[in-house]
């Protein structure tokens, strides 16, 4: 890792927040939900917010046993995040945990030549699942 574990950037009118969710390898200090909430608050002036992390919040490795997954889900809903994007399991999954409103997307594996392409056109967000090895 060459830089901050948690960071954000803006492209157009969209804020991207990258969050370290590796609870086990960071002595339970990750994810930093206080930092996340500050970023989400600041992001309210943008049309869209995407939160990206490796481990998704319904897994033990996220810190779910300590309630971090549920806290994360509450923040994502409160600040109306456009998408919560994750990896870790290397298997595509689109689901709506916690409030049934915010989409959570787990991407497939690049070693299987699979990836996701998002398109943002005003208020409309679409994505295409690309599978080159199907």
Image (cartoon, grey):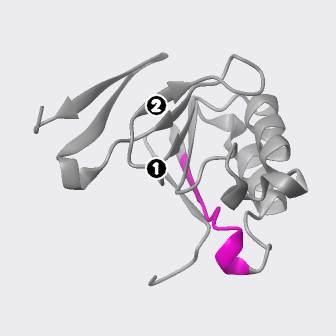
Residue 66 at x, y = what percent?
89, 57
Q: Image check: 93 left or right of 133?
A: right
Q: Residue at x 72, y 55 (%)?
A: 60
Q: Nearer the viewer, residue 86 or 112?
A: 112
- Within 10 Å of disc 1 (Cα), the crowding (few <14, some 14-19, many 20+) is some
Taking 38 as reference, is 101 above or below it? Answer: above
Q: Residue at x 46, y 82 (%)?
A: 1
Q: Magenta span has 25?
A: yes
- Horizontal and vertical percent for residue 96? 63, 23
**Residue found 69% across the figure and 27% down from its top:** 97
Question: Magenta segment range?
Answer: 16-26
The answer for how far apart the CA atoms under marks 2 and 1 are is 9 Å
Disc marking residue 134: none
Does residue 50 appear left or right of residue 24 in this picture? left
For label 1, the SS is loop
Q: Crowding near pointer 2: few (<14 within 10 Å), some, many (20+)?
A: few
Residue 72 lies, in percent from the top left, at: 77, 45
Image quadrant of residue 75?
A: top right
**Which residue is more in the foreground, 41 or 60?**
60
Residue 19 in magenta?
yes
Q: Quadrant of the C terminus?
A: top left
Is residue 77 positioned above or below 62 on the image?
A: above
Question: Which residue has dot 2 on it?
Answer: 93
Q: Residue at x 20, y 32 (%)?
A: 130
Q: How many marks?
A: 2
Give percent across and percent down for residue 5.
58, 73
Residue at the disc numbered 1: 89
Instruction: Using the rendered view, name the quadrant where residue 18 is placed.
Output: bottom right
Mark 2 and mark 1 in contact? Answer it, CB < 8 Å: yes
- As drawn, the residue found furthest toward the right would be 66
Q: Is residue 74 left or right of residue 2?
A: right
């Amino acid at each position: 890792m060459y830089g901050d574990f948690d960071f954000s950037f803006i492209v157009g009118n969209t804020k991207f927040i990258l969050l370290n969710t590796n609870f086990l390898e960071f002595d339970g200090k990750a994810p930093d939900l206080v930092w996340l909430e500050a970023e989400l608050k600041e992001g309210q002036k943008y049309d869209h917010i995407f939160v990206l992390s490796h481990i998704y919040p319904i897994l033990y490795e996220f810190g779910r046993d300590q309630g971090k997954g549920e806290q994360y889900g509450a923040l994502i809903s409160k600040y109306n995040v456009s998408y919560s994007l994750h990896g870790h399991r290397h298997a595509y999954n689109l689901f709506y945990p916690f409030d049934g409103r915010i989409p959570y997307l787990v991407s497939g594996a690049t070693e299987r030549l699979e990836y996701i392409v998002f398109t943002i056109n005003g208020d409309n967000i679409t994505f295409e699942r690309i599978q080159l090895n199907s």
